[in-house]
Amino acid sequence: MKYLFSLLTALLLFSCSTQKNTSKYSTIEYEAGACFGSCPIFKITINPDRTAVLEAEHFNFSKEFSKAEFSKPREGTFKGTIKQEDYNKLVALLDNLDVKNLNDKYGNRNVTDMATSYLRVHFADGNSKQVEDYGKKGSEKLVEIYKFFEDLRNNQQWTKVK
């Protein structure tokens, strides 16, 4: 009986120590830059445990455009945990996007009033990919993921920390 108990204890400890985070993404970041209008300026960083940081600069929570917004202080830094179903959807969108094979840059810089977005994906295997998209129209699947990130600002629980 003593040996059986020891064996079970060893198995339990071994199984606890070998559990891993199975996400293929170590960090997912999306950054939306300024335009000549009221484009939201923010950055969201999401970890595989679904914890997230939203760094909101301007135009994230106001519905009206005012040039005076730029003279106000940044809106703040917020922390939250992405809902499980939303995180699962994000992972599915990234998997469907085939991130590693995207171009590094998209967009036509001949137009001067568009916002630039940055999608940065750090993989669990140590590789990373950054996609810069001037105008946020790189592909239909990229547009879908940009909208998803923009929606996260309003459909998650965020707590202001700064």
Image: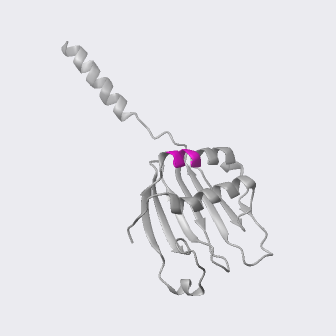
Q: Is residue 102 left or right of residue 53?
A: right
**Could you tell me residue 110's position as x and y percent?**
81, 75
Q: Is residue 12 left or right of residue 101?
A: left
Quadrant assignment, res 151: bottom right
Report if residue 127 is visible in the image.
yes
**Could you tell me residue 98's position as x and y percent?**
68, 46
**Could you tell me residue 112's position as x and y percent?**
75, 78
Q: Main secondary structure of the magenta part?
A: helix
Q: Is residue 28 left or right of residue 114?
A: left
Residue 22 lies, with reference to residue 99, above or below; the image says above
* Outermost residue to the top: 1
User: Which is nearer the eye, 75 or 4?
Assistant: 75
Q: Which residues are magenta?
A: 85-90
| Quadrant location of the N terminus in the rendered image | top left
User: Which is nearer the eye, 101 or 64?
Assistant: 64
Which residue is pictured at 72% across the width and 68% down the height?
Answer: 135
Report if residue 124 is visible in the image.
no
Whether 23 is among the magenta residues is no
User: Which is nearer the eye, 33 or 125?
Assistant: 33
